[in-house]
């Protein structure tokens, strides 16, 4: 299953994040793809705020991962936001012990997943973002039953 649309501006990116938050499932793994400035962190920030996180959401570019406690259907869940941009090799992912975080209890959102190619567990959902004029093109691709369930729950109608 897949879904494509145009996000006309930052508000549309935030609206997509708000629409994705109720679709999250424990154990879900999402890989975000796009060039620098494509909106990966902005989308993650919108998802986190819509899922109930009240504080600041920073890009984990230097820390590689930032954990957040959220609630999914009255269940406390850890959402881990990974940014692998600064990793020099896929082995760094293993050395940091990150692989263990991909389990049935956590939700993992990964930016720059190609930096851990061959080592990173496969995603349930790919989200591709690309700059298109003043807005963004976005494509969501489900790769598993969990990914399909997430997309089936998505209710998003951008204002074009």
Image: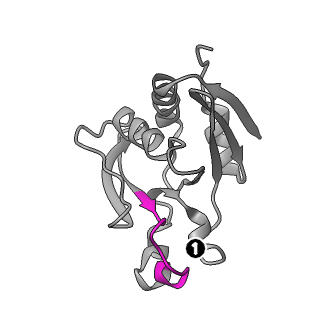
What residue is drawn where x is 44% and y is 61%? Answer: 82
In the rendered image, the vertical position of residue 152 relative to residue 123, given as above or below:
above
Judged from the image, the secondary structure of the residue bearing numbered disc 1 is helix
Can you name the residue that lies furthest to the top here? 159
Q: Quadrant of the N terminus?
A: top right
Disc 1: CA contacts within 10 A as few (<14), some (14-19) or many (>=20): some
In the rendered image, the vertical position of residue 30 relative to residue 19, given as above or below:
below
In the rendered image, the vertical position of residue 59 relative to residue 157, given as above or below:
below
Task: Give whichever of 157, 38 is nearer the camera.
Answer: 38
Q: Quadrant of the C terminus?
A: top right
The span picked out in magenta is: 81-93
What residue is drawn where x is 63% and y is 41%? Answer: 130
Tell whether 98 sits left or right of 126. Answer: left
Task: Give whichever of 115, 70 is nearer the camera.
Answer: 115
Counting from the top left corner in percent of width and height, residue 44 is at 44, 44
The residue identified by callout 1 is 116
Tell whether 36 sits left or right of 126. Answer: left
Counting from the top left corner in percent of width and height, residue 63 is at 32, 67
Can you name the residue that lies furthest to the left here? 55
Counting from the top left corner in percent of width and height, residue 26 is at 48, 52
Residue 153 appears in which quarter of the rendering? top right
């Amino acid at each position: 299953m897949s879904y494509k649309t145009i996000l006309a501006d930052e508000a549309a990116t935030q609206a997509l994040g708000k629409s994705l938050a109720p679709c999250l499932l424990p154990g879900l793994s999402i890989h975000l793809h796009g060039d620098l400035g494509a909106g990966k962190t902005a989308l993650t920030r919108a998802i986190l705020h819509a899922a109930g996180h009240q504080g600041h959401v920073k890009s984990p570019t230097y820390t590689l991962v930032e954990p957040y406690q959220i609630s999914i259907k009255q269940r406390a869940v850890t959402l881990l936001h990974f940014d692998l941009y600064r990793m020099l090799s896929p082995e760094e992912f293993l050395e940091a012990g990150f692989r263990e975080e991909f389990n049935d209890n956590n939700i993992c959102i990964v930016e720059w997943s190609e930096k851990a190619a061959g080592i990173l567990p496969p995603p349930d959902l790919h989200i591709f973002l690309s700059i298109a004029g003043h807005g963004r093109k976005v494509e969501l691709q489900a790769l598993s039953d969990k990914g399909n369930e997430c997309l089936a729950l998505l209710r998003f109608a951008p204002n074009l």
